Image (cartoon, rainbow, N blue to C red):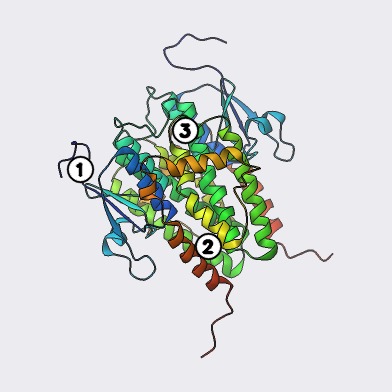
Amino acid sequence: MEGCGEDGQVKLLGVAYSSFVVRVRIALALKGIHYELIEEDIYNNKSELLLQSNPVHKKIPVLIHNGKPICESMIIVQYIEEAWGSKAPFLMPKDPYDRAIARFWAAFVDDKLTQSIWGVFMGEGEEQVKAVEESVANLLLLEETLSGKAYFGGDEIGLVDIALGGLLVGVQMIQKVTHTVLIDTQKMPLLSAWAHNFCMADGMKEVLPDAAKLFELMSERKAKLTSPPAKIG
Amino acid sequence: MAVEDCEPKGQVKLLGTSQSPFVVRVRIALALKGIHYEYIEENLQNKSPLMLQSNPVHKKIPVLLHNGKPVCESMIIVQYIEETWSSKAPNLVPKDPYDRAIARFWVAFVDDKVGPCIRGIFMGRGDEQQKAVEELVANFLWLEEALRTSGKAYFGGDEIGLVDIALGSRSQWIKILEKVTNIVLIEPEKMPLLRAWMERFLEADGVKQVLPDEAKMLEFASAIRARFAAAPAGN
């Protein structure tokens, strides 16, 4: 497909409600890149294409650019930035130090924050309380980093915004399903404002997961976790 | 000490500990690029104010301080070194965006999959340890295949790159683990390329000079393992 030359053929294997897929969709939307979204049945029937493209992890998202697969959401986002390096907006700062800081916080979101928030969703009782405390502590660190900027990336959405923004609707639904407050508007005014602005930004509405649908999926999943074991026989 | 050069230099300090493979990663990158730096040994039982100020989020080493500005997380530091001293050979990161994505993929694989298995084997016993061994062998087989696909001396090509640094820095630990647990993790018959790569890496210029002393590491590792493998004290 002749796009503006650089585009080539872009496919994205994923599911619309996955935070990790959403991250990639955000990056593609910001860069104005046309692509084909291929919905995968990840629980019951992964496609041949997915298994061939990501044989190591067999997970989504996978971006396939001119037939070549790229895996892992934040690696895909950096790939998009670099492969479409001359297309604004720029998702990464130019200065090496600023890039290191952006990578640091993106890694923080992936290694620390997602783990603690997952703990809130999966946990019960004491365990859940601990996970909430940890999540709040992690979010407060992000609140501090935001200090006075519209986005983590500065005036425009950048790597860290995408890392966290992809998770946003998921976090909001986890709060609802577990009856917990993680992004507290009083404790985290900057982060709350950021979340609002991010969701309202150009192109975001089309790629963020449907909140109601995600709530339904998560409620179902949570119910399965906490329901009594299956009957014998 | 001001040195007029066409390379951005300034003052480089590295906070680390002598046994850490994560610190080794940074030392390899600095050595390959020929960057002079001051190494500051940290005592993890008594972390310095500099360390706590420089990495308040994780309070971990390594931390690179370049002109007073801290960079944390070993592979982020390595990429920073590459980007700051980009005109200095060798290039640790491929030029092509796709090759970069592949390199980053394997780096993530080393840290997310290989690392926890190593820890699991080291700290675990019985069934748990056996499971970790099986998983690690499976992970190594993927890396063997990646080497086969590359067809070159290193994951990075003809020269050491990001993946070599990420995995290679753990080589000593892998060898020590084999000694201490009496389990062969990288069987030469099943993984000839990986075994050869590891020996090549450990002997490479820029690497061998910065590796921690193997005897000391073995002592350190044996002590930790004894603590974990010992039967619970009767108190």
Q: Give the letter of the chain under mark 3.
A: A
Gap in Å between the C-alphas at discs 1 and 2? 42 Å
Residue A205 at what x, y percent from top left?
Answer: 39, 47
Residue at disc 2, secondary structure? helix
Amino acid type shown at disc 2: Ala
Q: Give the letter of the chain under mark 1.
A: A
A44 sits to left or right of A183: left
Residue at disc 1, secondary structure? loop
Pointer 1 with pointer 2, Cβ within 8 A: no
Amino acid type shown at disc 3: Gly
At 36% from the left and 71% from the top, the residue drawn is A44
At 62% from the left and 57% from the top, the residue drawn is A180
**Image quadrant occupied by the N terminus of chain B:** top right
Label 1: how many Cα within 10 Å (few below 14, some 14–19, many 20+): some
Tell me the mark number nearer the camera, choosing from 3 and 1.
Answer: 3
Q: Say whether disc 3 or disc 1 marks the residue closer to the N-terminus.
A: 1
Residue B9 at what x, y percent from top left?
Answer: 49, 17
Tell me the mark number nearer the camera, choosing from 3 and 2.
Answer: 3
Q: Residue furthest right?
A: B235
Q: Are marks 1 and 2 on the same chain?
A: no
The residue that label 2 is drawn on is B132
**Image quadrant occupied by the C terminus of chain B:** bottom right
B198 sits to left or right of A230: left
Q: Nearer the viewer, residue B158 or A4?
A: A4
Label 2: how many Cα within 10 Å (few below 14, some 14–19, many 20+): many
The residue that label 3 is drawn on is A153
- Which circle marks residue A226 in the picture? none
Vertical arrangement, residue B110 with respect to residue B82, above or below: below
